[in-house]
Image: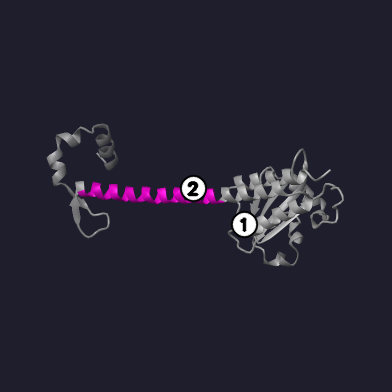
Amino acid sequence: MNSEDVAAYLQEHPEFFEHYAEMMADINIPHPHGGRTIPISERQILTLRERGKQLESKLREIIQFGEDNDAIGEKMHRITLSLLGARDLAATVHATEYNLREDFSVPHVVLRVWRAANGMGDLPLFQPVTEATRAFAASLVHPNCSTQAAADTLALFGESAPLLKSFAYLGLRDNETFGLIALASEDPHRFYPEMGTIFLSRLADIVAAALARHLT
């Protein structure tokens, strides 16, 4: 019999350990960290302790995720209240940009819309964008996070563009795509392709709804 056969036999016949309990108590096996041998029962205790430590580490990780999500949820609540209180388009844009920079700590925020507004077409919000940027925004089923600027959007960030290392793009839409939020950071790890985007999706929905009230 090889070791796999022995392991399979013991798994299929757990009563073996009852029938040979005294023998099991006398068996010594190598310590997992070397240097000596220990009874098999002590080895089992060490294994349980190691599993306990792994579970504690996993629990701490879950708790940290929960606390992080609570913090983001609170920020989402605050920006929602700010947008609900905005009386016009200029106030809506200010609330969006201010909360993203100050509350969410996003250093570079660009907001562009290509739908007409009532008497406020001179806002930076309406600066023209290329057809490639519009097409890119329309293609965003979900927010796009990357360490590379998408399409030709790098120019949107002006003089800061050469310093930027990570980006997030949120399409603004109601019945159709009418704008884009572009976020960027000098930190290459701030936005990355594998990051979760559920809060970014909700943010895009909230801002789009707030802006759409003042657009024709």
Q: Please tell me the numbered disc located at residue 103.
A: 1
Which amino acid type is shown beneath numbered disc 1? Asp
Which amino acid type is shown beneath numbered disc 2? Gly
Q: What x and y, as percent, mark residue 42?
A: 21, 49
Q: What x and y, as percent, mark residue 205?
A: 68, 43
Name the residue nearer the viewer: 22 or 60.
60
- Residues rendered magenta in the picture: 42-71
- Give the label, 1 or 2, closer to the camera: 1
Name the residue nearer the viewer: 9 or 62.
62
Quadrant holding the N terminus: top left
Residue 69 counted in the magenta span = yes
Residue that mark 2 sits on: 66
Q: CA distance from mark 1 to mark 2?
A: 19 Å
Q: Is residue 195 visible?
A: no
Q: Tag 1, which secondary structure?
A: helix
Most common SS among magenta residues = helix
Quadrant of the rendered structure where residue 141 is?
top right
10 Å crowding of disc 2: few (<14), some (14-19), many (20+): few
The residue depicted at 22 percent of the width and 60 percent of the height is 35
Q: Please tell me the numbered disc located at residue 51.
A: none
